[in-house]
Image: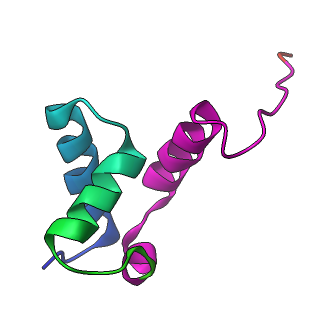
């Protein structure tokens, strides 16, 4: 359905913005609507979407917060 990982990632980000939900929820909703397991879309996740997913997981307290140093 998607030609590149960027196309898929853009679709998930657009879905998240349209429905005003996080990218994790948008990804899971996409998987549910298309009857596929989340593990099947891992090859379609690009760096940008991966970073947004990570931040979403941190916000939901599924991953530990990381300290950042400003130099």
Q: Residue at x 58, y 44 (%)?
A: 57
| Residue 71: % across, % down | 86, 16
Q: Which region is colored magenta?
A: 40-69
Query: Does 54 lie within the magenta span?
Result: yes
Task: Name above or below for residue 37 compared with residue 60.
Answer: below
Task: Name above or below for residue 63 compared with residue 17.
Answer: below
- Residue that lies at the very extreme toward the top in this rendered image: 70
**Which image quadrant: the N terminus?**
bottom left
Find residue 66 and report its image quarter.
top right
| Residue 10: % across, % down | 25, 52
Find residue 13 and report its image quarter.
top left
Q: Is residue 62 left or right of residue 30?
A: right
Q: Is residue 6 left or right of residue 30?
A: right
24 vs 6, nearest the viewer = 24
Task: Name above or below for residue 19 compared with residue 24.
Answer: above
Query: Does 60 lie within the magenta span?
Result: yes
Q: Residue at x 59, y 47 (%)?
A: 54
| Residue 5: % across, % down | 33, 69
Q: Residue at x 40, y 73 (%)?
A: 38
Mostly what secondary structure, the magenta segment? helix
């Amino acid at each position: 359905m998607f030609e590149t990982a960027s196309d898929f990632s853009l679709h998930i980000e657009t879905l998240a913005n349209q429905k005003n939900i996080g990218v994790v929820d948008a990804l899971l909703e996409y998987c549910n609507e298309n009857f596929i397991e989340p593990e099947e879309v891992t090859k379609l996740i690009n760096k940008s979407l991966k970073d947004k997913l990570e931040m979403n997981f941190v916000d939901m307290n599924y991953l530990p917060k990381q300290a950042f140093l400003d130099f």
